[in-house]
Image: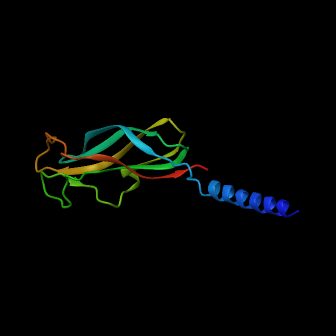
Amino acid sequence: MKNFGRRVTLTAILMMAVLIFFSCSKPKEGKVVVTEQEFLIRQDNPNAYVVDAKGKVRNVGEVDVKNVVVTGSCPSCIDAIIPGKWMGAGKDKTQDQKDVISFIPVGQEEEFTFRGVAFIYNTVAEEPKEKPEKMEVVIESFEVVD
């Protein structure tokens, strides 16, 4: 009878340890990466030009993702409007300056497009010869599908 009580106690302790181990397991993570990006110069006004972005993102995580917010930044751009200098869009983006992809299954790729990564105002109406030195597409946020 004494051995039976020990076995029950030992089995209960082992079952609790197994439950604790599995309840503490790491949840599956989502990960989205930019696979293609292209920056295009577009004339906005006679003396104003804008850089827009398009490309593709891929879900390389372990779970499906939704509400993927893709935007751009221009680290080499300045923050003030100076004729002939590229100006960045800043941190607060408008709806045109980001794209929201509603759903991306695991392993799948989706296209994005948005406007206004950088701006330039020239004193003459001619297209800039060069784009800003550094521009990048950024995955701002996403949600994991349960």
Viewer-proximal residue, 105 or 73? 105
- Whole-percent x, y for residue 107 in the image: 50, 35
Q: Is residue 109 left or right of residue 132?
A: right
Which residue is rendered at x = 29% and y = 59% of the image?
Answer: 90
Question: What residue is rendered at 13% in x and 39% in y?
Answer: 129
Q: Residue at x 20, y 53 (%)?
A: 77
Q: What is the quadrant of residue 125 in the picture?
A: top left
Viewer-closest of 83 and 32: 32
Q: Whole-percent x and y of residue 53? A: 32, 42
Nearer-the-camera pick, 94 or 14: 14
From this viewpoint, which residue is outermost toward the front? 2
Q: Position of residue 16 (x, y in %)?
A: 70, 60
**In the image, is 39 to the left or to the right of 101?**
left
Q: Residue at x 53, y 39 (%)?
A: 106
Q: Quadrant of the N terminus?
A: bottom right
* Front-lying residue, 114 or 141: 141
Q: Look at the image and name its color scheme.
A: rainbow
Q: How many marks?
A: 0
Left or right: 66 as drawn, with respect to 115: right
